[in-house]
């Protein structure tokens, strides 16, 4: 299915002076561009219709809108990167589009065709290209879908709004990636078998916030969750996947099932295997993590995701005691993979897996 987007430029866009001022230090997710993409769905009208690029504006929603009561909501996160030649790259938008469809399926929502997802993202990048930051910045893109039918009753909505908004973001780490500290959540779990852990729905993140607050109370940057059944095995952080690097050069990461199939995670596995490294997708317990860190068998641990790319983990704190990984410093494997991935994203090196889609 292909759709033609009706392009309606904003009549009162941000002035160049204000835009330049905002791009000096945009932070993350605080500054927004002038436009948004919108596609609507109505079962009675035969599906998806009215694809537009229009001025970013508030939604009008009835207080009985389904998303407000039953949380039928999904989202994605990806970035557009400015190349040295002035062009713009997207990184694996097809993978985001597929995952968005999978999320919709699990949440009993209408599935958006993958080509419509990609076209919406590209059209928004084109119209708001002046908002692309230079240097290590990027344009963060947030596609999302909400149930918009007006009713009170537990059933899938028959109406949806798909939208994409964009936010210029600076470098996630000022002065390079600093090792983060992790709090092990032993009271809260993030996902269970048969649940929604493997999809990107807002409820997963809402459920992680209490544990994240607990991490901050203990002086940590992030929280890591254990499995819901045995409370032994490492699963993922509040919003990132996790990898372990061992003294034999191999890597390990928790298996898919209850965790999000991260696109950065998948890319790291591919790049590590390209380099001849063994990558295992297998359960890894907190006790084993502690023992391997103490013995020196574990050389590095790092988290990964779209926003930060790769964050080295320096310290792990928990009720049962704290431990450091390799003296709390960023390791060469994490930093090497990070550089390789970022160089592909910005078009600075070859792209062996054809992950880059050039917008222009």
Image (tube, rainbow, N blue to C red):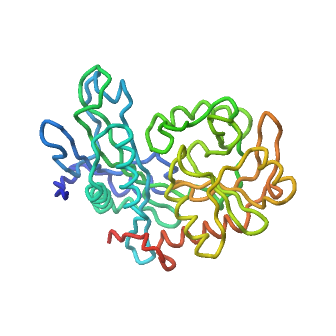
Question: Residue 299: x, y in percent?
Answer: 78, 61
Asked whether, in this view, residue 54 is left or right of residue 70, the answer is left
258 or 36: which is nearer to us? 258
Asked whether, in this view, residue 56 is left or right of residue 204, the answer is left
210 or 46: which is nearer to us? 46
Question: Residue 259: x, y in percent?
Answer: 54, 46
Q: Is 42 located above or below residue 62 in the figure?
A: below
Asked whether, in this view, residue 78 is left or right of residue 164, the answer is right
143 or 176: which is nearer to us? 143
The N terminus sits in image quarter: bottom left
Quarter occupied by residue 329: bottom right
Q: Is 258 located above or below residue 131 in the figure?
A: above
Asked whether, in this view, residue 238 is left or right of residue 331, the answer is left
The C terminus sits in image quarter: bottom left
Q: Which residue is drawn at 38% across and 51% down?
A: 166
271 or 348: which is nearer to us? 271
Furthest toward the top, the residue is: 152
Quarter occupied by residue 321: top right
Furthest toward the bottom, the residue is: 350
Q: Which residue is drawn at 71% across and 54% down?
A: 179
Question: Residue 4: x, y in percent?
Answer: 16, 58
Q: Is 350 located above or below residue 228 in the figure?
A: below
Question: Residue 290: x, y in percent?
Answer: 81, 48
């Amino acid at each position: 299915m292909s759709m033609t987007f009706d392009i309606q430029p904003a009549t009162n866009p941000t002035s160049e002076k204000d835009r330049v001022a905002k791009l000096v230090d945009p932070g993350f997710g605080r500054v927004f561009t002038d436009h948004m993409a919108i596609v609507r769905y109505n079962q009675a009208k035969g599906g998806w219709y009215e694809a537009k690029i229009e001025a970013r504006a508030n939604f009008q929603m009835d207080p009985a809108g389904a998303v407000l009561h039953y949380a039928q909501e999904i989202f994605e996160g990806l970035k557009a990167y400015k190349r040295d030649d002035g062009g713009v790259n997207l990184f694996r938008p097809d993978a985001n589009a597929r995952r968005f469809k999978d999320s919709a399926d699990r949440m009993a929502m209408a599935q958006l065709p993958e080509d419509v997802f990609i076209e919406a993202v590209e059209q928004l990048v084109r119209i708001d290209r002046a908002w692309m930051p230079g240097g290590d910045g990027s344009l963060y893109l947030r596609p999302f879908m909400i149930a918009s039918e007006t009713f009170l009753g537990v059933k899938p909505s028959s109406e949806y709004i798909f939208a994409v908004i964009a936010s210029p973001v600076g470098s996630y780490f000022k002065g390079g990636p600093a090792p983060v500290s992790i709090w092990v959540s032993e009271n809260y779990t993030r996902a269970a078998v048969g649940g929604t852990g493997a999809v990107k729905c807002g409820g997963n993140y809402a459920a992680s916030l209490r544990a994240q607050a607990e991490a901050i109370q203990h002086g940590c940057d992030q929280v890591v969750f254990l499995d819901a059944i045995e409370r032994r095995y490492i699963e993922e952080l509040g919003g990132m996947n996790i990898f372990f690097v061992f003294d034999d050069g191999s890597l390990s990461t928790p298996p898919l099932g209850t965790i999000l199939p991260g696109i950065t995670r998948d890319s790291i596995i591919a790049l590590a295997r390209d380099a001849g490294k063994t990558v295992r997708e297998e359960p890894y317990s907190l006790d084993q993590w502690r023992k391997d860190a103490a013995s020196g068998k574990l050389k590095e641990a790092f988290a990964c995701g779209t926003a930060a790319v790769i964050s080295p983990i320096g310290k792990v704190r928990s009720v049962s005691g704290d431990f450091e990984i390799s003296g709390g410093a960023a390791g060469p494997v994490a930093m090497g993979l990070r550089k390789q991935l970022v160089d592909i994203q910005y078009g600075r090196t070859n792209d062996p897996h054809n992950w880059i889609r050039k917008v222009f």
